[in-house]
Image (cartoon, grey):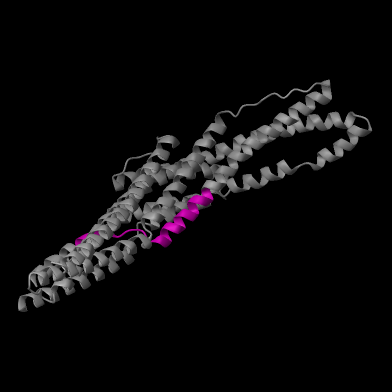
Amino acid sequence: MATRSEAANKIHKAIVKLLLAYDKAKSSDKTNISKSLTGLYAEHAKITGQPNLLGESYAALTAQFKASAGALNRVKERREQIANALVTADEIFKALSAVLVFL
Amino acid sequence: MKQVSILLIIAAFLAACSSSPTLEQSAEFGKSASTVANAYASAQQTEVDLIKVANVESGACDYLRDARLMFPVRQPDKSSAAIKEQVLFLKAVEEYATALSQAVDPAGVKKLEAAGDGFAVSAAGFVEKSAASQGGAVSPVVAPAIKTTTSIGIRLFDYGLRRRVREVVEKTDNVLKAGAIKLIQDVEKNKSALNTRYAAWLERKQCTLNRLREMPTTGAELYHEYVDANGAAEQFQSRIKVLDRTGEILGKLLDAHYALLSDDIDLKATLAEFRKLAGELDLLRTAIAKA
């Protein structure tokens, strides 16, 4: 029996295959591909426990992408902040060590 | 050995949670995002171009027919607004791809590690000088202990960040799938809207051509020039071909993003790193016990 992640992986591959087949498909097949994509995506969302976003507007999806980009930018900033803090601590220890010589 | 075993279990748990996309995977996704965004941006430009040439065509036809110049200003309608929203969505995907590549850039991690190394050396130096100023001496294992502890602290912190990146990618994959499926379902509508505009322009062009053909010599010369001026039509054909490849580029985009979630390589490397550090800690523990 397939695990959830295996099932999600198989659905993902099916979605990609349908998208790759779309361009050369006949007009009637395009309609079927379109319906299949909707069904597969709904199943993928159910399996992964994520919300079905097909009913959302592009503006709503755009906002979610901007939020993701913001979260990733914060990861980068956090890494830089800690590196800077360590450099500052390094400088403080060096200064204190220099003072200790005179004690 | 009990402490080391516990550490290894914690390390394995952290490693399992913290594998994150590589820079190469991120770059591949960024390339796909850029391709699809450009395709849509050119489709939007096509519609704007067609509206513009149709306006000029209408004006020319009216002038030649009635000797009066009128430019009926055609406003972009719903289809233009829809394409614009799709383009904005894809621009946001591109921005996300850029943020992703920066978040997983190894240069940032190296900078953090270098800062940690510098800190460990200074801290150990401070401890030694502090002991010396009081007439005492510190065990030789203190400096390596500080270094290893700092190194573990930095790795734990960085793995926390990597886990956050993975969470964001997982959540965003669902949004990307929804967006890609919506886009492919709208492509036919977009192409239909563009074809309608193209047909409207050709109709106005035909009107102008008919008037020119009926005119005396100057008009006939102009007619020949006019027939050759088909650049806009060629551009339309090339841009519509890009839309005919939307399925392919969206498929590649989805696959490139999904690859960001694969964790085989990072998991192995992370575990190896933790095992090495745990081994060093065990040696230090033994040395401290003997000191």
- Location of the C terminus of chain A (image quadrant): bottom left
Q: Residue at x 7, y 73 (%)?
A: B135
Q: Is residue B231 left or right of residue B138?
A: right
Question: On the image, which quarter does residue A80 sit in?
Answer: bottom left
Q: Is residue B224 left or right of residue A30?
A: right
Residue A71 seen: yes
Question: On the image, which quarter does residue B27 sit in?
Answer: bottom left
Q: Residue at x 40, y 42 (%)?
A: A66
| Secondary structure mainly formed by the magenta segment | helix
- Location of the N terminus of chain A (image quadrant): bottom left
In x, y percent, where is residue A42? 36, 42
Residue A21 seen: no
Tell me, yes or no, whether the highlighted magenta stretch contains residue B25: yes
How many numbered discs sit on the rendered protein?
Answer: 0
In x, y percent, where is residue A54? 40, 38
Against B121, is A59 above or below? above
Q: Residue at x 53, y 51 (%)?
A: B35
Most extreme residue toward the right is: B217
Question: On the image, which quarter does residue B51 sit in?
Answer: top right
Q: Residue at x 82, y 40 (%)?
A: B227
Q: Nearer the viewer, residue B99 or A60?
A: B99
Most extreme residue toward the front is: A102
Against B50, is B28 above or below? below
Q: Which residues are magenta?
A: B12-36
Against B133, is A45 above or below? above
In x, y percent, where is residue B46? 63, 40
Q: Is residue B234 left or right of residue B126?
A: right
Tell me, yes or no, whether the highlighted magenta stretch contains residue B204: no
Q: Nearer the viewer, residue A7 or B71?
A: B71
In x, y percent, where is residue B80? 57, 33
